[in-house]
Image: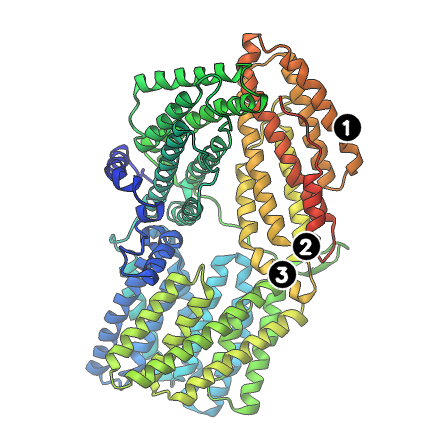
Amino acid sequence: MGALWTPRANRDLVRRHAGARARTMSETPATALGTSEGSTGGPYAGRVVRWLAIHDPGGIDTTRALQLAVAFVIVITLGYSTSRAFGLGLDVPFPLMAGAGALVLVTFTPAASRRTEARTMGRIFALAMAFLLVLIAVGPGEGHGNEMVQKLLLVPLSFLALVLRRSGMDGQRLGLSLIVVATVGTILAPTRAQAVYFLVAFCQGAAVMVALRLSPWRPSAVQAFVNSAHDVEEMLAAYLRDMSEAVRAGRPFPADLGPEVGAARARVWNALANASAEDPGARMDFEHLRAKIYRLRVAVLLLASCIPATGRGGPDWRAPFANAADHIARRLEVLDRVDDKAEERFERAIETLRAAAFDTSLDPAARFALLRAVTAFERLSLVVTGIAAQEIAPFPPPHAEEDQPPAPAPVPLLIRGPDGRRTFSAPLKVACQGLVATAITTSLDLAFHLEHAYWATMTVMFVLGNSVGETFMRVRYRTVGTLIGVALGMGIFLVLDAHLWLLAALCVFAQMIGIVTQKDRYDVASAATGFSVILGLHLIAGLGPEGMLARIYETVIGAGIALVVSYAVLPVYLTDQFRPEVRALLKRCRDSFASWWPRTQGERISMAPLAREVRQLDLRVPQLGAEQVFGHSAGDVVNIASTLDVLMTYLALLEDVTQRLALAAPQDEVVALAETARSRTLNAFAQALGEASADQGAAAAPAVEAAVPMVLALADDPQVEQALPLVADYLAYSEAVQRPLAELRIMLSDQAPWNRAAALAAGRAAPQAASP
C-alpha cells in the first residue's frame, strides 16, 4: 500500500498549526482542539465535542453513524417502493428487514481498510443468508408448530454464536450479528413465502450499506492519527514556551502537563487503533511514532523537574535554560525546517548549562538538577529529530501486502489443564453458559407465554461476557441503560405520538448514537438501543406503554439469568490469570533491562511491546475489579495497573540513557558505578517476583554510594565530565524504579483485601542511594 501521508501534506499541516500559534498561545489546549464550550453552543455540547475529539479522532465512527442514517433513508424508500410495486403486502416488514441488513453490517463491521471491511461484511452476509434459508425452511408463520421450532432454534444458535468467540473479537461480532438477524426473524415470524421476500430485503439493505461503506467519501484514519500526534506536539510546544517565560522571570514552574495533555494522549491511543485497522501492514510504523510522542511527553515533563530552586546568585543558568526550551518549542512548531544558526545557539546554551553544573558556587542540589537538565535537553533534541525524520518522510512508508500481520489462531475448544487432562477452554465454557441461559429464557417463554421473550434471549447474548467480571459490568450497564432509554422513549412517545416522522428521525438518531458510543460507553449505547427499539416497535407494530414496560422487565430477566449462569455454570475468572500475567510481564521487563548496557548479552530487547501489553491490561481493569464482588480478588487491580505504567515509564527512560551511555564509551569507573546500580535494580526485580527476600536488597544501596565518590573524583577528566550528566540520569531513574518494584512486591504477594498502607510503606522504604 502506498504512503498516505506525504511531506507536502505534512508541511501543509505544519503551516496550519503555525498559523494558529498566535491563537493557541492565548487559549487553553482544549480550546486549540476545538473543544471550548463557547465555540460549541454550550457546556453540554462542548462536553460532547470534547468526548468525540478524544474517543473518535477524525470522525471515523461518526462517519459510520451518518452513513447508517443515509442508508436507513434509502432502504426505507426502496423497501416501501418494492413492496408497493410488486404487491407484496409488506409495506412495513420489508423495509424493516432491509434496515436490519444495513444495521447489522455497519454495527458489526468495525472501521478498517476497505478490503478488510469488505471481507468482514462478506462473512456477516454469508452467515445471515444461511440463517434466512433456515427461516424459509421453518416458516414460523405457517402454524403454531413452526413458531415453536423457530423459538427452540434460538437455543443452538446462541451456542453457535458464542463458540465463534474463539476467533477473537471478529468471531464475537459475527456471533452477535447472527443473533440480531435471528431476533428480527422471530419478531416478524414470516411464512415461507414472506421469508423469501425478507431474504431479498436483507440483500437490498446490505447492498446499500456496502456501497456506502466502500465509497471513497470517508475520512482517513491514518491522517487522523498524525493530526492527533501534531496536537500533542503543539500542546507540548506551548508548555515549553510557558516554562521558558517562568524560568526567565524566576517564577516557580509546576511539573504538571495538565489534564488536556492526558486527554490528548488518550486520543492518540484511539487514533492508533483506527489507523492500525485501516492499514494493518503499517502498524509497527504507527506504534513507533506513538512511542516517540510518548517519550516526548515524558521528556518534557522530566525537564520541568530539572529546574533548580535557586535565587539569583551564582552563574547565570536561567538565560541558556530558557533559550534551549524556546529552541525545542520552535522545532516542534515547524518540524520540517532546520535552522543551522539556531542549532548552534542551542549547542552554546547547552554548553553554558553544562559549565554552570560544575560551578562550585551552586549548591549540590542545583548542580545535580542542571546536570539532569543537560541530558533532558539532549534527549528532547534527539526525540524531536526522530519525530521529524518519521513525519517528513512519506508516512507510513510503502509496504508489501505480505507485511500484513497474520490473523490470530482460534482458541482450541479443549485445552490441557494444570493436571494434564483436557478441559473446556474459556470460549467453550462461555458457549455452554449461553446454551443454559437461553434454554432458561426459552423455557420461561413456553411456561408463561411471554409476549416478547426474544428480548430476554437477546439480552443474554449481549451481556454474556468472556468472564464473570465482564458479564457483571455489561449487566449493570445494559440494565441501567435500557431503563433510561425506555423511560426516555415512553416520554417522547407520550409527547410526540402524533408526529410519526419526527419519531422516526429520533429513532435513527438514537441508532447513530449507539454506533459512536458502543466501544467506550456501553451504558450510553444500551440506552440509545433501548430508546430506538421502543420507538421503532411503536412505529412498526403500534407498541403501547404496556409493551414498552415489558422491555424493562424482560431486560432484567435476561440480564439476571446471564449473571447467575455466568457465576454458577463453568465460571471464567480473569482474576485467576491476573497475578500470573503480571509476574510474567515483570519477568520480561527484567529480561529486557538485563539485555541493556553495561552488560549486554545477545540482542537488546526493547520495552515498546511490553508497553502495549500494559495498555491492554489497563483496558481490562474494570472487569477485573468487578470480579471482586464474587469473592475473586487480585488485590487492587487499579493500583497494580497504574504502578506498572509508572514502572514502564522509568524503564523506557533507562533504556534511552543506557543506549546513550553505551555510545559514549565511558571509563571503567563509570561502568563499575552503573554495574552496581544495575545489580540493585535486578535485585529489586527478584524481590518483586518473590525470588529474593527484602533483606537481600539492603546491601545494594551502600554499594552504589561507595561507587559514586570514585566517579566524582575523576570529574576533571573531559571524558568523564561529558558522561556525568548521563550518569546522573541513570542513577536517578535506577533509583526511581525501586519504588514501583517495592510496591508491586507487596501487591502481588498480598491476599485480599489489598493493604494499601503496606504497599505504599514498602515503596517509601525502598533502598535508595545518594545522588552525585
In the image, residue 283 sits, relative to residue 251, either above or below, namely below
Mark closer to the chain start, 3 or 2: 3
Residue 581: where, in percent of width, then height?
Answer: 65, 48
Q: Amino acid at mark 1?
A: Ala
Q: Where residue 140 sits in the image (x, y, percent)?
A: 43, 85
Q: Which residue is mark 2?
A: 635
Q: Which residue is mark 1?
A: 699
Give the labeled residue for mark 3. 426
Q: Is residue 770 left or right of residue 722?
A: right
Picture coordinates of residue 103, whole percent (x, y): 35, 68
Residue depth check, mark 3 versus mark 2: number of the one nearer the observer: 2
User: In the rendered structure, which amino acid carries the disc numbered 3?
Assistant: Ala
Between 245 and 757, the one nearer to me in the picture: 245
- Residue in the picture at 35% in, 25% down: 327
Displayed quadrant of residue 532: bottom left
* Secondary structure category for the residue under label 1: loop
Residue at x 44% of width, y 75% of height: 484
Three-letter residue code for mark 2: Gly
